[in-house]
Image (spheres, rainbow, N blue to C red):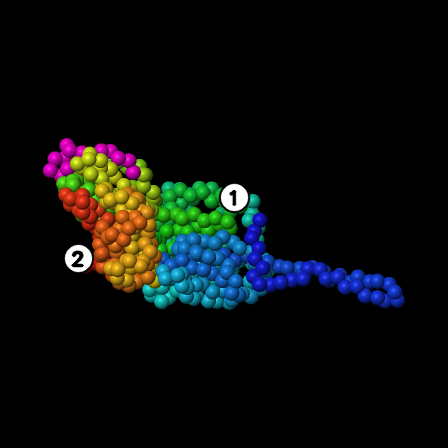
Amino acid sequence: MKRKYSLGLCFSLIALTACSDDDDDKIVIEETPNIEYAQVRVIHASSDAPMVNVTADGAQLLADVDYAVSSGLLEVEASTYAITVDAKLADGTTTTVLSADLAAAADMEYTAVALGNVSDENLMLKLVANEKADITADNARVQVLHAAPDVGLVDIYVTEPMADIAMMEPTLSANYMDNSDQLEVPTADYQIRITPNGDKTVVFDSGTVNLAAGNDYFISAIPNEWSGDSPVALLVALPDAQVLLNDVSSGSDIRVVHAVADAPAVDVFLDGSMTPAIDMLSFGQFAGYVNIPEGMHTVTVAADADNSVEVIKDAEVDLMLGASYSVLAVGSLSNNDISPWAFAEHTRRIATEARLNVIHASYSAGNVDVYLTPTADISASEPALTDVPFKAASGSLSVAPGDYTVSVTVTGTKTVAIGPLPVSLAANGLYSVAAVDAENDTSMFSVILMDDFVAEEE
């Protein structure tokens, strides 16, 4: 059943009035108004925009809509609405970034797509309207939107899997902001490929996808903010669900961090190879992201000076298509306790905020509190993160751009064990700080700074 939203309209369903006429009571009944409905869907396709709230006539329709998210079809009364899209800022406030009037007619479906870039000041709403219509038996319905502003005119091929497109005409061609008509196709397995216009070089390949009978697919080509070299990913919106399709060759991006303070330089081997994927990585260093196929892999870490000394042997890591990961070697060599620790990274940059990941990789420290304050004085401050255990990461925190001091204390105390570390966090920036033991001295602590960090260490 579709969701229904009144959006501020109030109707009296039945009014009863009694009156006297020649001593006869008469009841007058007002008929229930015939309320007509339209369907509205909102898609967030602006790759550098934060989460947004969507309102209609001042009433909240949707909250916390993130990039590459579709609301699904919402059923609303047919009327004209003032639609606003409010960006959620890191300081907790919101600001209106888009507004438009939507005349929602009965028996129509509307898809409103927020696209463009905040940083380029070309954010806008693209509205696609379709009449409601049944889908023919044994068919699926597909509509395609080009929503990637940095990609020009493209050809789109929708074929049976593994078909040779060399001599084929494209199914359709589209420029930025173009959308196709709704197309019905027989239910079957298909392959979707995108090439530059007039060129057969594939820049996106969906692999085999099934278009199921009776399903209504709205497919947006959006900027690729995941792993791999393809300029786009496909956001497949259905009436009540969504699927993200990354290019089949996107693989996974991983970077390796040497966070074992008492261990020498190491080599890192993948999947039993005799050739190191990363050579001579010293404590406090990290290797930049490298792309490898998704799926299960083994990681072996050996001393650079003697590869027969393996401190981590054939540790399994399971990597998802399109995802990015940091893999930290953590622990203590002297305690014969070294292991890999892998976690997913958020690599999308957001124009209105900095993104900060705080990582507890200090083997000798207990649970800690993390402070992010305007100055080094934390005496009256509450921690930004509290009771953080070893091998835990904050994830990507939204932080208002500015100058801060990072301080790490043992949980429940104000005694600074790591820091105070002055940092500058800029909008559109990615920052990671890993708390680690100091080299060869487990009574002291240090940090490893990654990504865009620029800091003055005391």
Rendered residue at 29%/45% (across/down) = 367
Is residue 102 visible to the viewer in this orientation of the structure?
no
Q: Position of residue 143 (x, y in %)?
A: 47, 53
**Is 308 part of what is drawn in magenta?**
yes
Q: What residue span does the magenta drawing correspond to? A: 302-317
- For mark 1, what is the residue? 213
The amino acid type, in three-letter code, at marker 1 is Ala
Rendered residue at 41%/51% (across/down) = 235
Q: Position of residue 354 (x, y in %)?
A: 31, 59
Outermost residue to the right: 22
Q: Secondary structure at mark 1?
A: loop
Is residue 339 visible to the viewer in this orientation of the structure?
yes
Q: Position of residue 17 (x, y in %)?
A: 77, 64
| Majority secondary structure in the magenta region | strand
Q: Secondary structure at mark 2?
A: loop
Is the residue marked by circle 1 packed among few (<14), some (14-19), or many (20+) residues within 10 Å?
some
**Is 249 part of what is drawn in magenta?**
no
- For mark 2, what is the residue? 458
Rendered residue at 27%/48% (across/down) = 410
Alpha carbon separation for disc pair 1 and 2: 64 Å
Viewer-nearest residue: 350 or 37? 350
